[in-house]
Image (cartoon, helix red, strand yellow):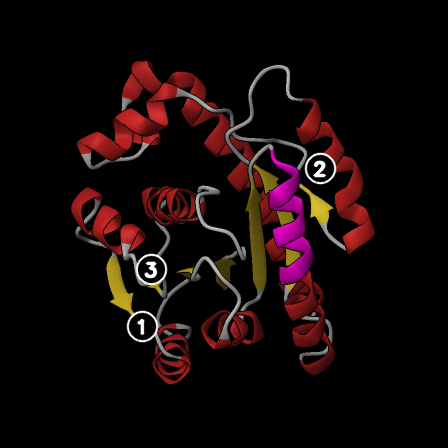
Amino acid sequence: MVIVFTNTKGGVGKSTLASHMAIFLHDTGAKVALLDADEQRSSSSWVSEAEPAIEVWVATTPETIAEAVNELRPQFDYVIADAPGRIEDESRTLMLLADLAVFPVTPSILDLRSVAQAVDVLKYARTINNGRPDAILVLNRIKKRDTISKELAAVAPSLGLRVCNSSVRDLQAFRNAAQQGTVVTRLGTSAKEAAKDIHAVFSEVLMQGRQKVANE
């Protein structure tokens, strides 16, 4: 299964979630590869340090992205792709090749606008790929009393996106994990709440992806 983390706006936690997803799946015993298509290369650096056993590829042109996905897909249970923080040919290529697109958004109306732009690419891919990829919106860096997050969740269905029932809170543990070159699910009790969020969100995301693949 190819899972792409994408958005047209940087700073939404796309690379953080992609890195956590790759290691989360690896720790369940799945065979996982990470494809970093973002020129900042945050996820490839993070995963290479946190878990050298995960195969990491970097591809930043449409041609090399397509070649990488076509080579990795048959070899791995999951290919986790970190798309660029903008919609260009590289992101379009990933969307066309994905089984599931994950749209992380933070509590900002600007994030919703960026998702609306990305949804246009999603719709285009679906017309070509017989309804693929499936897509889900994940609310990230949520604070306890976040009214904008509720507005995002309310508006997203009008864009044709399912909203993940679970969300990821804005917790210090994520920053600690980045500084230590690891992920919150490996930090033990000090990151208990953050790990709980990751487990809940990824379990739901994976369930949706598996249901879509099973129905095809």
Q: Which mark is residue 152?
A: 2
Of labels 3 and 1, the one closer to you? 1
In the image shown, does 94 or 86 lie closer to the viewer? Answer: 86
Total marks placed? 3
Q: CA distance from mark 2 to mark 1?
A: 32 Å
Of labels 2 and 3, the one closer to you? 2
- Callout 1: 10 Å neighbours few (<14), some, many (20+)? many
- Residue 170 picture location, percent across and down: 47, 24
Q: Say whether disc 3 or disc 1 marks the residue closer to the N-terminus.
A: 3
Q: Element under label 3?
A: strand
Q: According to the image, label 3 marks what residue?
A: 34
**Residue most extreme to the front:** 110
Q: Is residue 142 above or below residue 8?
A: above
Magenta-drawn stretch contains 92:
no
Q: CA distance from mark 2 to mark 3?
A: 29 Å
**Left or right of residue 166, residue 91 in this image:** left
Q: Is residue 27 above or below residue 213?
A: above
What's the magenta region? Answer: 108-118
Say which amino acid is labelled 1.
Ala
Q: According to the image, label 1 marks what residue?
A: 59
